[in-house]
Every structure is written in structure tokens, then in C-alpha cells.
Image: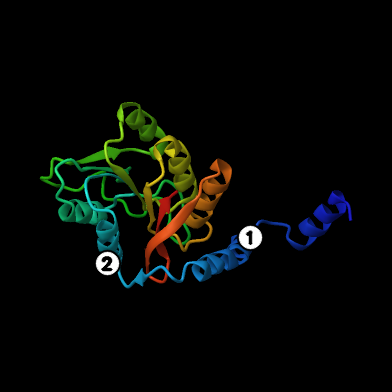
Amino acid sequence: MDMSFKRVIATTFFPKHSGFLDKLNRTPLFAEFVKENRSVTSFDTREEMYDDLMAKYPGAIDYLEFGVFQGKSILYWADKNKETASRFTGFDTFTGLPEDWDYHKKGAFNVDGKAPITQDSRIKFVKGLFQDTLPGFLKDFSRQNRIVIHNDSDLYSSSLYLLTRLNDVIVPGTVIIFDEFGNVQHEFRAFFDYISAYRRSFKVVSASYQYYTAAVEIL
């Protein structure tokens, strides 16, 4: 069957792209991922997973969080990691999602442009779209500790951009946390597109919420 005939059949039965069908098609991939990594403990809460990661990777860290919202995660990590050499940087527009995400509309998670308030001098916040702020940040960034990347950006476009843009600093030993990894059309899809395109390898090191939230170490 030649490609033109296949295209006619496809467009006849599926004249428009269906997000539902795309999600349905990708869901078995996530199920396979869970099956392959059942030996990795999945905790009941994110905080338990964070504690597990801190126990596995003690010492000073360069923590980069993408999607800060009200700052619960970055403040938790900074409170638990007392190393004076640790650095914590949170990236967010603080004006909400730049595009629709599932049932959340553009602008959801808006905190009126206000970053969380903290007295911890190790914590910095970078306001704006990742595409606008990350290149400038990386010009002045020099890795000093193990890098921990916390991706809570939700969106495929944001996740794929930050992973590809950070590729040069994602050295072996880097830990990457995905807050909505179980969303097969967004963070999950972006990670595997990145891994495939850049020929990177990884192992799963912790999880929570039945692997919906997951952490990997780059090998």
C-alpha cells in the first residue's frame, strides 16, 4: 500500500487531529515505563520523594526549578538542604501558563507576577518565559555542584525547550525531577523526545503518586 493511499485512508477516518486519540495511543508507553521500573519505590507524597532524593544525593547542589508557582517545592528543598554552597534558582513567569494545558487554560496558576518571599540568600528567582530568560542565565552560569533540575513546567513545549537548552549542563549524575511525568502528552513525551534526540541514557531513582511524579539520574 503506497503512502498516498494510506494518507487518504487516514484523513478519511480521522479528518482532524484528536488529542484524545493521541493520549490513548501514548498511554501504553507510560504503562510500560511503570512496569519496567516497579523496583523503584513510589512514595505517597512528593515530599517523601524529595527526602528520598536528598538521602541518595547528599551535599551541596545547584537546584534549578522550572515552574515555581507559589514556591512550595523550591522552599522545601532549600529548607532541607542546609549546605551553604548550595544554590537554588526558580524560573517562572509568575503570570500563569503561557498556553492551555489539558483542562487548565492559559493564565492558570497566575500569582500576579509575584515571586515567593524568602530570606534565604541562596534562593534566586528569574521572571519570564524560559525561552527569554534561560539563554541569558546560562551565559553566566557555571556548575559548582551536582545539578538537580525540577521540571514543574507542565507543558510539552516548555519541557522540551528547557531540556534541550540545558543539554550542555546535564552531565552524568544530574538528577531531573518531573512533577507531571504521568502526563503522556507533555512532560513524559518531552523527556523521551529529548533522550532520543540527544542520545542520553538514564535510570529512574525515585517516584511518587504511582510514578506520576518521577526522578531520573542521567548516566
Nearer the observer: mark 1 or 2; the answer is 2
The image shows residue 124, relative to residue 184, as above or below, that is above
Nearest the viewer among 19 and 217 is 217
Residue nearer the viewer, 103 or 5:
5
Q: Position of residue 120 (x, y in %)?
A: 12, 45
Q: Position of residue 194 (x, y in %)?
A: 52, 46
Q: CA distance from mark 1 to mark 2?
A: 37 Å
**What kind of residue is marked 1?**
Ser
Structural crowding at the residue carrying mark 1, measured as other residues with C-alpha within 10 Å and reported as few (<14), some (14–19) or many (≥20): few
Q: Single out the residue that lies furthest toward the top.
A: 139
Give the residue number, with chain letter if any, for mark 2.
Answer: 48
> Residue 189 appears at what percent x and percent y?
53, 54
The spot of residue 67 in percent (x, y) is 34, 49
- Reading the image, the residue beneath label 1 is 18
Q: Quadrant of residue 44?
A: bottom left
- Disc 1 secondary structure class: loop
Report helix, strand or loop for mark 2. Answer: helix
Instruction: Locate residue 60 relative to residue 120 in the image: left or right.
Output: right
Q: Residue drawn at (48%, 60%), measured in percent from left and top?
A: 102
Q: Earlier in the sequence, mark 1 or mark 2?
A: 1
Q: Depth check: 66 or 199 in front? A: 199
Tally of numbered discs: 2
What residue appears at the point 16 percent right and 46 percent down from the top-left corner? Answer: 83
Within-10-Å neighbours for mark 2: few <14, some 14–19, many 20+: some
Q: Residue at x 23, y 56 (%)?
A: 72
Name the side, left or right, on which 182 lies relative to 68.
right
Picture quadrant where residue 39 is located: bottom left
